[in-house]
Image (cartoon, grey):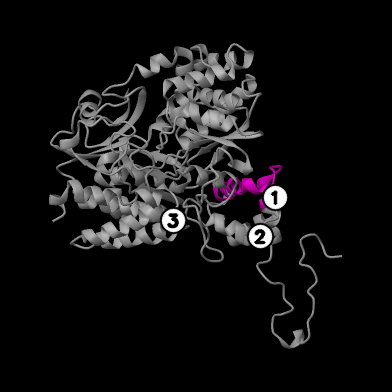
Amino acid sequence: MAGKHEPPPQRRHPGAGRRRGRNRPRGRQVDPDALEQIRALLGDRPRRRDLLIEHLHLIQDRYRVLSAAHLAALADEMRLALAEVYEVATFYAHFDVARAEGELPADVTVRVCDGLVCEMMGARRLLEDLPGAVEDGVRVMPGPCMGGCDRAPVARVGQRLVVRATVDELAQAARSREVEAAVPEYRDYGQYAAGGGYGVLRACLDGGLSREDVVDKVSASGLQGLGGAGFPTGRKWQIVRGYPGPRLMAVNADEGEPGTFKDRYFMESDPHRFLEGVLVAAWAVEAEAAYIYLRDEYAEVREILSRELPRLREAGLDAHVELYLRRGAGAYICGEESAMIESIEGKRGLPRHRPPYVAETGLFGRPTLVQNVETLYWIRDIVERGPEWFTAQGRNGGAGLHAYSVSGRVARPGVKIAATGITVRELIDEHCGGMQQGHRFKGYLPGGASGGMLPASMADLPLKFGSLEEHGCFVGSHGVVVLSDQDDVKSVVRNLMRFFKHESCGQCTPCRVGTEKAVGLLQRPSWDEPLLEALGVAMTDASICGLGQAAPNSVRSAFRFFKEDLS
């Protein structure tokens, strides 16, 4: 009998001896040494399909490249078709699949963010000058927004984030092999618990609060989903609870919108306030498990959560729900909730057609509550202080608090926790110390790359859901990028469209082809407004998800509000 991993005997057909190669096994054969390496690396970890991305990370972390031999061995060990493994490995930007047999991995990879704010702050010069300053074996490449817009330009040397980066600093980090993530100081479990943390959760678990009490408080607060869509949180909890169990929960910690970094701030500084929100929400909808999907760019946060999640188990605070930390792999599209769910299941991050919605049919086909990090961050305060406290914080007709990610040409960029409905002028003057010296306020992006652009003359509009749509814009994830008279609108629009082209998942033609065509049209000296508008209409009307639908917003804003800059 053939051994377990030997190819089965080949059936001979008439004429097989006369046809060269017919009696040879088809497809890539599994290398025994590679298979043993994969088995040793995976150890006693389950070989489930949904862990494919996690296992690919293990291989790349160990060997710095995904070789053909290791991918074939992984497919064999997980009982998957090799095509399934390859389609996932090649979909995500952070997986380095060897292009040729025996290709050696780079000793160090330096990714320089080429997002809008980093480009404004000099990233292009870094990408031009850095290759000549590093030694052989160091790979320099651009990377999309890394969530460090408040400290631009940023780059990652391996897993280490370098902020306000210079050529000399990056070259030194690559030379010294400083590639591990540097974890910042944060409020750990002991500090959080000593300050009353997890009191709300304990009241829930001990019977001091009922599920109806908590859902009613969240509903009365008017809290909305702060990942960008703004759907009422309490209403979402009621919808998920209305479907028969078992139910699951997915936490969207994959913020990749250029100009947005608020979730990183919350998880790096006060992770347990966010985690208490996760546990309360899971309890409220009776979710059996909660999956925290964290973008791969946030290596520091991954280390923090890896340290702190076991503390919850030790304290007996997660007995009602299984908590899982899942690592993204560099795909902006996975910020879309159904694409994130596909990725958690170990697949390519392709948005699903709806209906059904994920509240009804989400993770593994079960009713699923999906929430953003910031939304969950506010749960403790709302339940503890009451919904009236939260609603009293608004301004200019808004209600509640938001974390605004402010970057660009302001004196003090960063996460600004401010009243819902604040204007960008008030943000700049009251929270950011005004404009940078020598810069005059010209315009702003109210909602990151997707939310369009507005001129300085419209700086007194309230930044809240529903206030900017009549102007062709929206606040989305509240990523505010401030532009000055020294920024070229054409360059801004080109950068944003290049981002969407790079991040399109490729599933639907209007987005895949539309973003590519738009980039080409925007490279021309003179922009064809009717043609770009026709292209934008096709993308908006026919794209499956918000990426393609929102990609034309900056182009339309430029023609509507900055036409004098386009001549």
Residue 135 visible in rendering: no
Tell me if mark 3 has few (under 14), some (14-19) or many (20+) residues whose alpha carbon lies within 10 angstroms of its own: some
In front: mark 1 or mark 2? 2
Which residues, given as a range, are shown in magenta? Answer: 38-61
> Which residue position holds label 2?
81
The quarter of the picture where the C terminus appears is bottom left
Front in this rendered view, residue 308 or 535: 535
Q: CA distance from mark 1 to mark 3?
A: 29 Å
Helix, strand or loop status at disc 3 = loop
Residue drawn at x 40%, y 44% as measured from the top left: 156
Q: To which residue does mark 3 refer?
A: 137
Q: Please tell me which of labels 3 and 2 falls first in the chain.
A: 2
Residue topped by disc 1:
39
Residue type at tag 1:
Arg
Q: Nearer the viewer, residue 468 or 320?
A: 468
Q: Quadrant of the N terminus?
A: bottom right
